[in-house]
Image: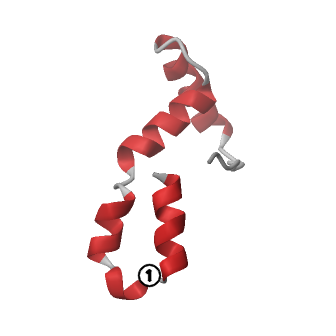
């Protein structure tokens, strides 16, 4: 499942993102997805850490996102 998200970035941040994306031969959007994926823990790790705070629907959402 893929969901869409819109980010509003400062012009300077977008310029840096675009410049780095060019060096990696990809788009700024692809680089942003990769950076977020690398930074965010997997859904299973989040579920273990905060198990009492998550509803079953929350677990499904995190697993779908992973």
Q: In this orientation, which residue lies closer to the viewer: 31 or 17? A: 31
Image coordinates for residue 21, horizontal then vertical, percent: 53, 20
| In this picture, residue 52 sits left or right of residue 22 | left
Picture layout, residue 61 above or below residue 51 = above
* Residue shown at 29% from the left, 63% from the top: 45
* Residue shown at 34% from the left, 71% from the top: 47
Residue 21 shows in the view: yes
Q: Mark 1 falls on what kind of element?
A: loop
Q: In this orientation, which residue lies closer to the viewer: 1 or 34? A: 1
Picture layout, residue 14 above or below residue 24 = below
Residue projecting furthest to the bottom:
52
Image coordinates for residue 64, horizontal then vertical, percent: 52, 56
Which residue has dot 1 on it?
54
Q: In this orientation, which residue lies closer to the viewer: 12 or 31? A: 31
Image coordinates for residue 60, horizontal then vertical, percent: 51, 68
* Residue shown at 68% from the left, 48% from the top: 7
Using the rendered view, name the quadrant where residue 13 is placed.
top right
* Residue shown at 33% from the left, 62% from the top: 44
Image coordinates for residue 29, horizontal then vertical, percent: 62, 31
Q: Say few, some or many: other residues with alpha carbon within 10 Å of mark 1 (under 14 / 14 to 19 / 20 or more).
A: few
Using the rendered view, name the quadrant where residue 48 is placed.
bottom left
Picture layout, residue 1 above or below residue 50 = above
Residue 15 shows in the view: no
């Amino acid at each position: 499942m893929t969901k869409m998200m819109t980010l509003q970035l400062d012009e300077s941040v977008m310029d840096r993102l675009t410049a780095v994306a060019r060096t990696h031969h990809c788009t700024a959007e692809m680089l942003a997805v990769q950076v977020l994926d690398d930074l965010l823990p997997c859904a299973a790790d989040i579920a273990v850490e905060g198990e009492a705070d998550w509803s079953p629907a929350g677990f499904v959402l995190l697993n779908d996102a992973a």
